[in-house]
Image (spheres, helix red, strand yellow):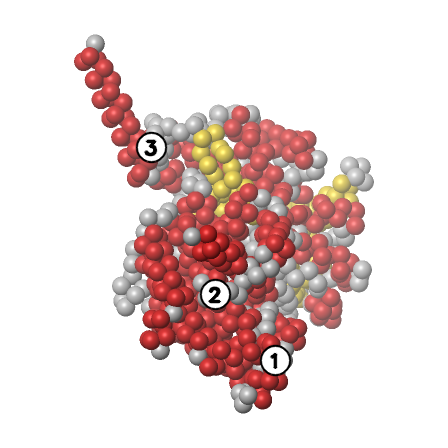
Amino acid sequence: MRKQFTYKALRSAAIASAVAAAAMTGATAQAKDTIKVGVVSFLTGPAAGPFGVPGKNGAELIIDAINKGELPAPYNTKGFAGATMDPVYTDEAGGNSKQVAEYRNLVEKQNVDALIGYISSGSCMAMAPVAEELQKLTIMSVCGTPRLFEEKLRSVVFRTQGNAVGDSIAAARYMTEMFPDLKTYTGINQNYAWGQDSWKFYSLAMAKLDPASKASSNPQFPKIFSGQYSAEISTLSLDKAKVVHSSFWDGDIEAFVLQALVRGFFEDKKFVSVVGASAVDSLGKKFPKGVVMGTRGPYGLLTRFDRSRPLNNWFVDSYKARYGVYPTGPSYQYAKAVLYYKLGMDKAAAMAGKFPTQDEVVAALKGMEFESFGGSVKMALGGGHQAIHEVGYGITTWDKEKKAPSATDVKFYSAECINPPEGTLAADWLEQGMPGAKC
Amino acid sequence: MLQILRSDKTVRWTLFGFFVLAIAGNFMPTWVQNNLMFGMARGLAVLGLMVLWRTGLISFGHALYFGIGAYAVALADKHFGVSDIFVRLILAMGAAGFVGLCLGFILRKYRSIFFAMLSLAFSMVLYGVLVKVEALGSTDGFSVSATSILGWTPESKYTLFCAIIVACATSACMVQYYLKTGLGALTTAIRDNELRVEYLGYSVAKAIHFKYIISAALAGASGAMMAMALGQVDPDSMVNWTVSGELVFITVMAGPGSVIAPFIGGVVFEFLRTYAFELAPHAWQLIVGGTLLAIIFFLPMGLWSLLERIWVRKGSSS
């Protein structure tokens, strides 16, 4: 009896010290019931309404469903490697330096297991070095600057969204195919990584696809979130260029469209918007017809009523039921990043035969191919850390029957048609005339 | 100088306080260390503002110098690979001090709201330039590489933490010394009666100019330390008017009572914001603003007056 007691005491002491040791070294190899994940999006400021909140809602919806195991097959396993996710929703507003401080707080104070989110390319560029320094798995969901993985290979940073290269080349392809007569173009883009890169790659692609095309010498670069564009609209209207390219997003696209609309801007110019579909939904019937509109992937406006497959239908229906509106691009993009994290966790757990460590999850995430809502995603660039997927454009119109905005002449370009192969810089690839593009 | 410093009670308490903090920092979790670093760094700029405030001047544009300091560090790092803490601090203080010297010639002629608004205007000029120019990083800014000390790059942030504490302690003592000198003693005199100070034979303009340069250099050092502690600079969190507003906020919250007050204010502000952000991600600004209102209502002389009151009560009861 006494012997047994000592044995029991010894055993529990051993377990306790093992647990303590594991906790002290920060190893998380033992099975966990819950994981804590920071979900970062704009909750205040001009990007909150059209991007941050729909993004957060998309994440919230799918996190709840995964925690309960309610996603359609084959994603209907419960939890993330069996663990329930406890999301910590955080605001992305306030500037990069503040975000770096908040990132450190999430990792070091709140002890999150991973981070999902970030909309602005500025946030992503600023967060990647901190993520590498603290070695914390970070899945970026929306931001688009190609610099993120072209400047440096990252070890714990992933991005499930295709970058500005694909969006811009697809836009250029669409314009040269649909409007070959419009040879001159100008642009209005926000003066930061995303806007600068979007314009750069659009002009590079146009120069290659249609050597007779000509860029204006005076493209506009206002500050992000400035909201007032009367001077820029005047300059663009006076410019002889027929096409106006824009990568505006957040509240800026709505402000621009409303201010330009009253001046008859859209009758004079062919407007190409890379990511303005959120404004089409929020402005509804007021949004001008005939605008070339992109969604940065197979979702939102362009594919709302087709691409019928269980996961997509489930997402659109549950989102509409829960939030009263259709999901927009950021909703899909956040949900996609969460789904990717789940797949990585489950795969790593299956390979390791136990609850996976971060290194095992990173290895599982690297180079993964998976079916998302509207189409497949390949983690093909940046050493298996950067996604490529198809990108489409259409022309805005108003659907009288459904009483909803819709798009005509929708065309999708495959991932390999608009992205360079791994190891080639996008600018070099365009310079060489896009060798090996499969369209 | 040493005589004054040695006999001064505030200096002794400051040095003791900072020393204790440096030791305690070693046992704190990283996030507390980080918040303390940010709070201290901001406190240094507030120290400069406090010197101006004692003269009756409020600057709504010290983000200009804060930003110059931060960008001096970031640009020197990007173009010349400068990572040494001493070079970084000297560069930042030099650049900020020089701009302060130039602008001081204009600003020293103005008082009250005109002084505040004109300094705001200058800071927004820098903001506009940074945002427009792609070579200066536009709204993205730059990341800043790790800081080294005389060729040695420490593994943990604790070394930087101690370095920041040393810099803050030194600055606090220097300012305390300055306030005791003849020129420094003019501070409150100018606020109370400028004309009389002129009759006494001092140049008010020169005295204000000198204080302005001190506060600019301190804000420059503050920005540099912030850039090093964060590893990132960008116009919205370093140069925008909201940053000037935050500095004034901390100045008012801390109170003009002592050279230690700005650091206490800075640290309190940092923790307040961290917790507000965590508890109410949708409305954290409301909590921060509400706290300032409460402090203005109940503690018009700032947090420092609260400490003073406790101090006096203890003294009288024993």
The image quarter containing residue B171 is bottom left
In front: label 3 or label 1: 1
Residue B308 versus residue A105: which sits nearer the camera?
B308
Chain bearing tag 2 is B
Q: Is residue B307 above or below residue A135?
A: below
Name the disc covering residue B193, or none. 1
| Marks 2 and 3 belong to one chain | no
Question: What kind of element bears circle 3?
Answer: loop
Residue at position x 46%, y 52% in the image: B317
Per the model, the C-alpha gap separating discs 1 and 2 is: 22 Å
For badge 3, the amino acid type reads Ala
Q: Is residue A12 left or right of residue A316?
A: left
| Label 1: few (<14), some (14–19) or many (≥20) C-alpha neighbours in 10 Å | few
| Marks 3 and 1 belong to one chain | no
Q: Residue under circle 3?
A: A29
Q: Is residue A396 above or below residue B42?
A: above
Q: Residue under circle 2?
A: B258
Q: Is residue A48 above or below residue B149?
A: above
